[in-house]
Image: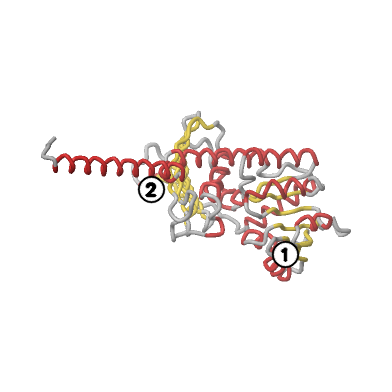
């Protein structure tokens, strides 16, 4: 931390999300953006120049200069980088999903606890002002519908849409439910990549509540919305426009539309990524448990991995090993049919009919 009390931040990962973090941190008076690291030095240098920081090719060279780090690299490298940083006493914001496996997520959480540092998971939708406001009105929901759709983005083709997009909604869903998951069903398909590009899950909770979630990255229209049905009320949330509509009945039962009260709470426009980083700064300065914590991030990851596993289970023909076995079976079958035809032709030529 500088003499002025500013927290010295670094960013590892010079992709789209890393650039967002660097740009936001550079504008925050409580922060000094020290550097940006990436294996692609040109990308790191470009972002560093834009925000008056230093570019680093090796992320370890950034560690001695900083108090806190944003880890915005591909998911499979989260654990490696975050654990090394926290072992140096550096607070970390690890982009979602927390890790690529439960085992690696636990390594990150253990490193944070061992080194007594803040570790926040980057579920930025938690800080969407529409979500923040909606959670104030949601109580014991009976049915939830969540949709998150948009166009294909090659930069995240290394993971499926469940881990890339749906995990946001899984995290929010778990935050509003006071009941454990009882069962889960999921279907999906890989259309443009080798992973799931469309994913649909139905989650049942022990209290009887049901949630339907859909995530797609093969849709040209961007859509981010949630609809919640609960006793006496229906709540509609549009994440993109930050609008909420709440429908409540004034008379029981309603006889006309006039018996239904429709309200739209006023929502202050705020930038979610800035709110997320301010939250981390507050947690660092006052050593508070961040939202979401590692445990919450792990719970969302577990559910996302279960959805992914269900999709793979019902998508066997796309499994390379199964495809190969299928090809072999088809070849054997074709040879058998050919042998039968040849044999029958020989018998026919000899005047023997079957």
Q: Does the image show residue 71?
A: yes
Q: Position of residue 323 (x, y in %)?
A: 42, 45
Question: On screen, 220 above or below 115?
Answer: below
Check disc 2: other Cα within 10 Å, few if <14, some if 14-19, many if 20+.
Answer: few
Q: Residue at x 89, y 58 (%)?
A: 3
Q: Position of residue 348 (x, y in %)?
A: 14, 41
- Whether label 2 touches label 1, CB < 8 Å: no
Q: Does the image show residue 263?
A: no
Check disc 1: other Cα within 10 Å, few if <14, some if 14-19, many if 20+.
Answer: few
Q: Position of residue 224 (x, y in %)?
A: 49, 53
Q: Residue at x 48, y 48 (%)?
A: 226
Quadrant placement of the N terminus:
bottom right
Q: Residue at x 77, y 57 (%)?
A: 9
- Left or right of residue 59, residue 173 in this image: left
Q: Position of residue 303 (x, y in %)?
A: 55, 38
Of pointers 2 and 1, the one earlier in the residue sequence: 1
Give 332 or 153, whichever is nearer the viewer. 332
Q: Residue at x 23, y 40 (%)?
A: 340
Question: On screen, 261 above or below 268?
Answer: above
Q: Nearer the viewer, mark 2 or mark 1?
A: 1
Quarter of image, res 14: bottom right
- Left or right of residue 38, residue 340 in this image: left
Q: Which mark is residue 258?
A: 2
In three-dimensional space, the C-alpha distance between marks 2 and 1, rounded to whole angstroms, equals: 48 Å
What secondary structure is found at the residue carrying circle 2? helix
Mark 1 highlights which residue? Answer: 27
């Amino acid at each position: 931390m500088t003499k002025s009390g500013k927290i010295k931040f670094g960013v590892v990962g010079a992709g789209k999300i890393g650039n967002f973090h660097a740009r936001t941190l550079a504008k925050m008076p409580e922060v000094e953006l020290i550097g940006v690291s990436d294996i692609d030095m040109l990308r790191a240098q470009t972002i560093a120049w834009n925000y008056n920081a230093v570019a680093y090719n090796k992320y370890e060279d950034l560690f001695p200069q900083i108090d806190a780090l944003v880890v915005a690299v591909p998911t499979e490298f989260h654990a490696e980088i975050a654990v090394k940083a926290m072992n140096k006493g550096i607070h970390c914001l690890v982009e979602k999903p927390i890790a690529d496996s439960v085992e690696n997520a636990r390594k990150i959480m253990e490193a944070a606890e061992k080194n007594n540092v803040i570790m926040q998971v980057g579920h930025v939708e938690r800080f969407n002002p529409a979500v923040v406001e909606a959670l104030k009105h949601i109580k014991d929901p009976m049915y939830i519908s969540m949709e998150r759709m948009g166009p294909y983005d090659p930069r995240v083709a290394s993971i499926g849409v469940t881990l890339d997009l749906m995990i946001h909604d899984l995290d929010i869903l778990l935050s509003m439910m006071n009941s454990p998951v009882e069962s889960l069903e999921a279907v999906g398909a890989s259309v443009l990549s080798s992973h799931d590009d469309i994913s649909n899950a139905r989650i049942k909770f022990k209290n009887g509540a049901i949630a339907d979630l859909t995530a797609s990255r093969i849709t040209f229209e961007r859509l981010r919305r949630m609809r919640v049905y609960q006793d006496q009320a229906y709540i509609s949330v549009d994440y993109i426009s930050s609008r909420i509509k709440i429908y409540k009945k004034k008379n029981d039962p309603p006889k006309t539309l006039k018996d239904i009260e429709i309200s739209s709470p006023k929502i202050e426009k705020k930038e979610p990524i800035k709110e997320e980083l301010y939250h981390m700064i507050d947690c660092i300065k006052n050593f508070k448990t961040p939202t979401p914590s590692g445990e919450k991030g792990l719970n969302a990851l577990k559910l996302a991995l279960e959805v992914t596993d269900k999709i793979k289970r019902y998508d066997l023909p796309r499994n390379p090993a199964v495809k190969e076995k299928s090809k072999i079976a088809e070849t054997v079958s074709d040879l058998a049919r050919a042998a039968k035809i040849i044999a029958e032709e020989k018998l026919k030529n000899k005047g023997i009919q079957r």
